[in-house]
Image (cartoon, rainbow, N blue to C red):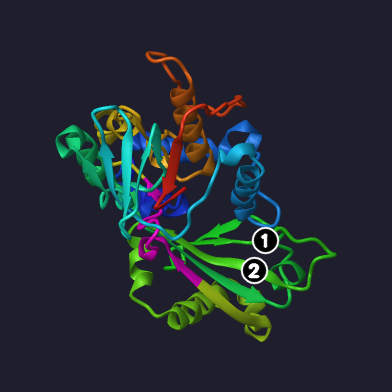
Amino acid sequence: MNLSRAAIDYIAISGNSETNLWTSIVERVRSIDLPASDDGKMYRIVEGSDQLVRSMVNDCQIMQSNRCSILYSTPINQVELLPSNQTRLRTNNGMSQIFDAVVVATSPTVSQFFDFEPRRDFIEKYLALRQIHYTCSSKILLFFNTSWWFTQENIQGGSSITDLPVRSIYYPKTTINQTDGGTLLASYTSSQDSIIWQSLSESDAIELALQQLIKIHRNSSNMRNYFQGGKVKHWCQDPYVRGAYAFLAPFQETELVEKLEAPLSNIHFIGEYTSFVHGWVEGALSSSIRAAEAITTEPGTVVPTNGIRTISINFLSLVSVFSYYFF
C-alpha cells in the first residue's frame, strides 16, 4: 500500500509516534497491541504505585529469623563473580559482602556504571547494556482546584494527542461528585520530544504547558483561574534510572534481548528492558518471576521469559537484590 507523505505524517502524529518512526516495527506494533489487549482493561494501584514497594518492604520485615533485610543509601560499585560461584558486592563506603545469588534490578543505563568482575566474563553483557536504545521521557503535571475538563467540557478521562510540544494530555477520570479539582498530566513526551523540554527550567516548562493547554481547550481558556501549580519529571535526569524505558531499534530484538536477560552464573538481571513488555510494570514483574524461578529451580530448567503467574518461592540461600541501592 502506497501512502502520501501527508498521510504518513498524519498517522505518525495521531499515533503519537512521530519521533519513533525509526525504531523497530516489532516494538512499535507491540506498544500499540499491549494496551489494546485484554479488552482494553487497565489497572492502577490505589493511592500510588509506591504502595506496591511498601507492601514488599512490609513482607520483608515480618519474615522470621532475619531472613530478609534492607540496606538503604548504600550504592554498589562492584559486582564480583567468585570462583566458588558466589558473588561479592562492594559498596562506595567500602562495605563488602558475599551472596549465593544476586539479582541486578537496575536500568541498563545505571548498570553500565557497575564494575562487573571478572570483566572478560561480562563482555557480551556490557555490549548489550551499552547498545540497547533506552529512551527519555518527560511528564508535566498541572494542579487545578476545579475540574474544568469535566465541568466545562464533560471530559471524563482519556487522552488527547496534539502536534504541539506537549504532545499527549491525560485527563483524570472525573464524576459529578469529584469536581473540586485534581492533577492533569498536561504533557507526556518521549524520545526527542522529551529532550526539548529538558532545556527549560521547571517554572518555564509549567507555564508553556499551561499556555498550550489553553490553546487546545479554547472553551476553557479561564483554566488559569483554577491553576494551582505544577511539577515536572524528566526520567533521563533521574540519577537512579537515567532513562525511562527500553524502546528497541531495528534488529535489537534478535541481537540483544537474549544477552540482556541472560544470567551470568548466579547473577541475574531483571527489569522491563529484559522482558518483551517494555515500559510497563508488567514487564518488570515478569522478569522478576523469571529470575526467582531460575534461582529456586533445578539447574538446566528452562524458565519462561514472558507472562505473569503466581508462584510459591522459598528462598533457601542467601540472596541479594539491588536496585541501585542493594537490599
Q: Quadrant of residue 301?
A: top left
Q: Quadrant of residue 213?
A: bottom right
Residue beneath disc 1: 172
Q: Residues within 10 Å of mark 2 (few under 14, many from 20)?
A: some
Rendered view: 213 above or below 267: below
Residue drawn at x 17%, y 39% is 119
Residues under numbered marks 1 and 2 in contact, where contact means CB atoms less than 8 Å apart: yes
Residue drawn at x 67%, y 76% is 144
Residue 169 x, y percent position in the rendering = 55, 62
Q: Earlier in the sequence, mark 1 or mark 2?
A: 1
Range of the magenta residues? 232-246
Residue 43 is marked as none
Frontmost residue, 221 versus 307: 307
Give the residue type that dot 2 points to.
Thr
Residue 140 x, y percent position in the rendering = 51, 69
Rendered view: 33 above or below 168: above
Residue 219 shown left or right of residue 21 in the figure: right
Rendered view: 274 above or below 77: above
Residue 271 x, y percent position in the rendering = 43, 41
Residue drawn at x 18%, y 37% is 118
Residue 247 shown left or right of residue 149 in the figure: left
Residue 194 shown left or right of residue 120 in the figure: right
Name the secondary structure under disc 2. strand
Frontmost residue, 281 versus 165: 281
Give the residue type that dot 1 points to.
Pro
Q: Quadrant of the N terminus?
A: top left
Seen as rendered, the residue at the extreme bottom is 225
Residue beneath disc 2: 183
Residue 87 x, y percent position in the rendering = 32, 36
Q: CA distance from mark 1 to mark 2?
A: 7 Å
Name the secondary structure under disc 1. loop
